């Protein structure tokens, strides 16, 4: 005697049997992937910045991690010295023992940097905490004319190269960096630089020991309140 069977629902005439929808790969938007990259400061052995930069770039290619890597930048500045009565312009590193890395921070990138001879660690990070990316303003300060248009826009740089300052004279501002960080005051003057390659400064009136004191700070060191 055969086992009773469960009644089955008949398919409508001419109906096609349904099949599982095929899995489709999601296309990766290159622009979205690029947007995950940020600039970080990395501690390296002083005096070996250039060779360490080259070593990291080689490792990135060898390990196939180009998608997480943008570039490495070593901040430099011009200075003048006199030799035999002649003024000579040279370049020197702004931050000896440090370099800037544009990466999508993840475990693979972290291990690549740590395994490269001469590299210390990402500034601001620890074993249990990811490093804090540089702000667009800090990147602009370090890179100057070499900064990308996207960073210029985020830092408030117009197409003509002039910096857009989000506050004016008599506005209330708060110092976010430097000796007077955390203090609030009033903008007395915005000092435009004589050299187009330099940044504007701001004269802020702060109350120190109960007295108004004029303090000159970089424009990026204060935020509007």
Image: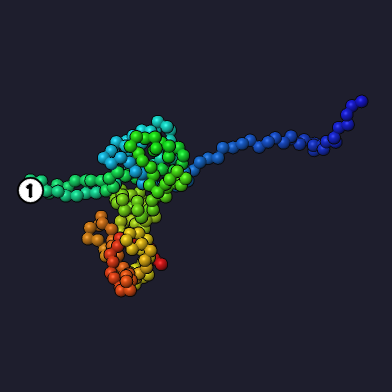
Between 18 and 25, the one lying in front of the other is: 25
Which quadrant of the figure contains the N terminus? top right
Q: Can residue 57 be seen in the rendering of this structure? A: no
Taking the spot 28% from the left edge, 69% from the top edge, the residue there is 214
Which quadrant of the figure contains the C terminus? bottom left
Q: Residue 18 lies in what quarter of the image?
A: top right
Taking the spot 38% from the left edge, 51% from the top edge, the residue there is 134
Q: How is the image coloured?
A: rainbow
Q: Residue 104 lies in what quarter of the image?
A: top left
Which residue is under mark 1? 85
| Position in image of residue 50 (x %, y %) | 28, 38
Judging from the image, what secondary structure is the residue with disc 1 in? loop
| Position in image of residue 2 (x %, y %) | 89, 27
What is the number of callouts on the image?
A: 1
Taking the spot 36% from the left edge, 62% from the top edge, the residue there is 181
| Position in image of residue 55 (x %, y %) | 33, 34
Furthest residue in direction bottom, as rendered: 211
Instruction: Tell me: residue 117, above or below residue 122.
Output: above
Between 90 and 185, the one lying in front of the other is: 185
């Amino acid at each position: 005697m055969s086992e009773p069977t469960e009644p089955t629902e008949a398919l409508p005439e001419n109906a096609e049997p349904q099949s599982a929808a095929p899995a489709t790969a999601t296309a990766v938007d290159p622009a979205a992937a690029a947007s995950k990259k940020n600039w970080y400061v990395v501690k390296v052995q002083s005096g070996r910045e250039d060779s360490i930069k080259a070593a990291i770039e080689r490792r990135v290619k060898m390990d196939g991690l180009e998608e997480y890597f943008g570039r490495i930048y070593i901040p430099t500045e011009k200075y003048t010295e006199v030799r035999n009565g002649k003024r000579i312009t040279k370049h020197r590193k702004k931050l000896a023992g440090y370099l800037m890395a544009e990466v999508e921070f993840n475990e693979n990138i972290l291990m690549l940097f740590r395994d490269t001879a001469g590299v210390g660690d990402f500034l601001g990070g620890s074993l249990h905490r990811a490093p804090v990316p540089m702000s667009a303003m800090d990147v602009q300060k370090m890179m100057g004319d070499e900064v990308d248009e996207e960073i210029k826009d985020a830092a408030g740089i117009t197409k003509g190269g002039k910096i857009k300052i989000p506050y004016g004279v008599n506005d209330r501002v708060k110092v976010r960096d430097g000796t007077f960080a955390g203090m609030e005051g009033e903008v007395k003057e915005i000092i435009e630089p004589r050299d187009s390659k330099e940044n504007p400064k701001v004269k802020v009136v702060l109350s120190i020991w109960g007295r108004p004191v004029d303090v000159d700070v970089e424009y990026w060191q204060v935020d509007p309140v």
